[in-house]
Image: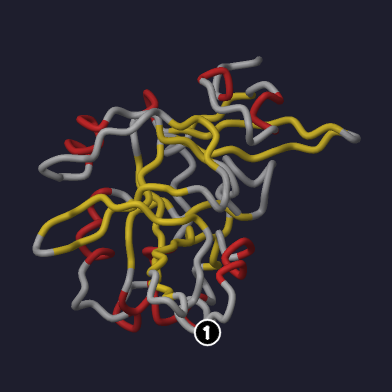
Amino acid sequence: MCGRFTLTASAETLAEVFGMIRFPVFSPEYNIAPTRMIWGVVFQDGQRTARQFKWGLVPFWADDPKIGVRMFNARSETAHKKPSFKNALNKRRLLIPTTGFFEWERVGSQKHPRYFQADKGQPFAIAGLWERWFDLDGTELQSTTLLTTEANDTVRPFHHRMPVILPASRWEQWLDPTLSSARLPNDLFAPAPNDVLHIHRVSQTVNNVRNQGPECIERAD
């Protein structure tokens, strides 16, 4: 699964990496948790555009948006069959920019966090889905979920699931609005190669979602 991640790269770096004219300026985020507003990259008006989404997908048919609290991840293997995700998988796919994510190792009563990042802390993309939901007064909520897959050898000692990490060579295909979910190749959802991610131990500072500073990702080994 993926229940906590970071986005610490600059807007300029993200614009360059994701092939965009610009990325909105924002403050670095070191401990992003579900229900927060997060950045997503979509294909809109012929170009890649960054927009904000609430993390925790609210299906368009939901009676209560609180359902999104438990919809922050979707299993890539079954998303095409789930009422909550199948329409979004077919029509509303996006990239979630990130610079790393956290998993925990339980030792007795303690949870020891680990931080997973790409080489030199470079940004990478997690595959996501997004949805529109309208309140009775017409207020629109745009929300998102992160897709997961089986863990690779790097992540497996800490969790049996990991985010679907898409290489840049697959971004255009994933964002293509003319490509239905039935035409998506299965290998899009394969676990990332073992050498894509580097891991180090961090302090338990990150365990509290109220802690948001760079100390959340500092090496604690």
> Hey, what amino acid is under mark 1?
Pro
Quarter holding residue 94: bottom left
Q: Quadrant of the C terminus?
A: top right
The N terminus sits in image quarter: bottom right
Measuring from the top left, give residue 70's x and y in whole percent: 63, 63
Front position in the image: 198 or 16: 16
| Label 1: few (<14), some (14–19) or many (≥20) C-alpha neighbours in 10 Å | few
Q: Is residue 151 above or below residue 6?
A: below
Q: Is residue 98 left or right of residue 111?
A: left
* Residue 2 falls left or right of residue 98: right
Q: Position of residue 167 (x, y in %)?
A: 31, 49
Residue receiving disc 1: 83
Is residue 106 visible in the rendered image? The answer is yes
Observer-nearest of 154 and 204: 204
Say whether residue 129 is visible.
no
Question: Image point 40% across, 81% down: which residue?
Answer: 87
Point 48% across, 58% down: residue: 146
Residue extending furthest toward the front: 137
Where residue 80 appears, x then y in whole percent?
Answer: 46, 80
Count all numbered tags in the image, as a single digit.
1
On screen, residue 34 versus residue 93, left or right, reads: right
Image position of 169 with respect to 11: above or below: below
* Direction from residue 44 to residue 157 in the image, left or right: right
| Residue beneath the point at 26% across and 33% down | 25
Give the quarter of the image for residue 47.
bottom left
For numbered disc 1, what is the local secondary structure? Answer: loop
The residue that appears at 35% across and 44% down in the rendered structure is 97
Query: To which quarter of the image does residue 66 belong?
Result: bottom right
Say above or below: 99 vs 136.
above
